[in-house]
Image (cartoon, rainbow, N blue to C red):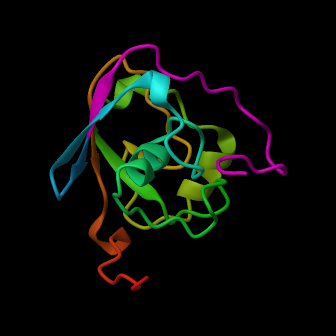
Amino acid sequence: MGGINPYQEQVETPLPDKSYSVTFMPMGKKVSVDPAALPLSREGRPGSILDIADGHGIEIDHACGGVCACSTCHVIVREGFESIPEASESEEDMLDEAPGVELTSRLACQAVPSGAADVVVEIPGWNRNHARESH
């Protein structure tokens, strides 16, 4: 059910049609995104920043499971913001609850880059989980 909340109006988000990269800050990890390989995980909308992060082992907290029902996956898009479609009203409502919101803030579970530009995303310090459970 990743990325879809049945209690919210659904917005159609097209997947990209060309390759691009996403750099996750502050770790500086750059990953290449192949549109043919999307989705990479079951978290967030297919092709979302959360889907890409999860598919590459980059942890972004997402307490609701990536269905736009909380603000824990709040990220700040530092470059390539114009390549991400506008936030839905539901996403904007959730962002109202997030700390440290900036003009280029988005929920990683909902933001699906179009591939028109490379993207640089900052994961805020309060959102980085420094503890890991052993398997």
Q: Is residue 32 left or right of residue 26?
A: right
Q: Residue at x 64, y 37 (%)?
A: 88
In the image, residue 43 above or below residue 82: below
Residue 79 visible: no
Q: Which picture quadrant has residue 134?
A: bottom left
In the image, residue 81 above or below residue 55: above
Residue 7 in the image: state x and y as whole percent: 84, 51
Q: Residue at x 53, y 64 (%)?
A: 62
Task: Write the start and end of the magenta stretch as one range.
Answer: 1-22
Q: Is residue 87 left or right of residue 27?
A: right
Q: Is residue 49 left or right of residue 89?
A: left
Q: Is residue 44 left or right of residue 1?
A: left
Residue 107 in the image: state x and y as whole percent: 50, 50
Farthest right residue in view: 7
Please name whichever residue, 24 or 39, is drawn nearer the observer in this view of the structure: 39
In the image, residue 12 above or below residue 66: above
Q: Main secondary structure of the magenta part?
A: loop
Residue 86 included in the magenta stretch of the image? no
Residue 4 included in the magenta stretch of the image? yes
Q: Residue at x 61, y 57 (%)?
A: 94
Residue 12 in the image: state x and y as whole percent: 69, 26
- Quadrant of the drawing holding the C terminus: bottom left
